[in-house]
Amino acid sequence: MLSAIERSGYYPGLVADAVSSAVGAEPVVSYFVHHDAHFDQGMEVRRHLTVLALTPTRLIYSHTDEYPADQGAPDSRPQAETSTEAIRCSRISSVAVTKVIPDPARYVRGVTAPSEVVLTIGWNALRRIELEPAHCDDESCEADHGYTGSLAPDDVTLRISEAADGSEAVAQVLDFARALSDATAVS
């Protein structure tokens, strides 16, 4: 795991210290390291690093964000913010894996790899609510019917694709998801 953090090239000392502190003396059974970037509203590139580490008793979730120097302040320097959370395996309520399979007519069981994987892990710390205006069946009705929506766990979601992250990363996230599912089945 520490080698994968080092290979990411994203503040490896900071990230390794944060994850190691949360892991403590427990051995790491499985891990996944995901480095990605996105554009903020000012069209600046912002990098993120997420580390998921599974120990015999806990899931360690670490996320590091970078913030550029403030252009208006002469002595301003870039900053990084890293957070970790240690979740007992018994608290994990869901491990959801969505696979995108290209050309499903040619799918071969145990051979064909997905081109994309979305891993969502829930332990009920955060929830996402999606609201939309409620409607009735009367097309001419103009009354306000309030809102309808859904509430879903949203603790961590990672999207890994062959095109962006490589086929090895897709395989690694599937291996991690399998190990986490196994760990939560016995908790």
Image (tube, grey):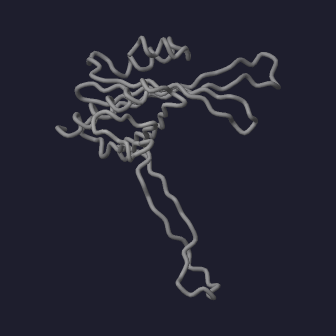
Of the 4 image quadrants, the one containing the C terminus is top left
| Location of residue 112 (image quadrant) | top left
Figure check: 38 above or below 69: below
- The foreground one among 171 and 104 is 104
Q: Is residue 28 left or right of residue 49?
A: left
- The foreground one among 34 and 164 is 164
- Expressed as whole percent of the image width and height from the top left, the position of residue 97 reads 36, 42
- Residue that lies at the very extreme toward the left in this rendered image: 186
- The foreground one among 118 and 166 is 166
For the image, the number of numbered tags is 0
Residue drawn at (37%, 41%), measured in percent from left and top?
121
| Location of residue 102 (image quadrant) | top left
Residue drawn at (77%, 16%), measured in percent from left and top?
75
Of the 4 image quadrants, the one containing the N terminus is top left
Figure check: 28 above or below 90: above
- Expressed as whole percent of the image width and height from the top left, the position of residue 135 reads 55, 78
- Expressed as whole percent of the image width and height from the top left, the position of residue 166 reads 48, 26
| Location of residue 172 (image quadrant) | top left
Residue drawn at (28%, 35%), measured in percent from left and top?
110
- The foreground one among 23 and 119 is 119
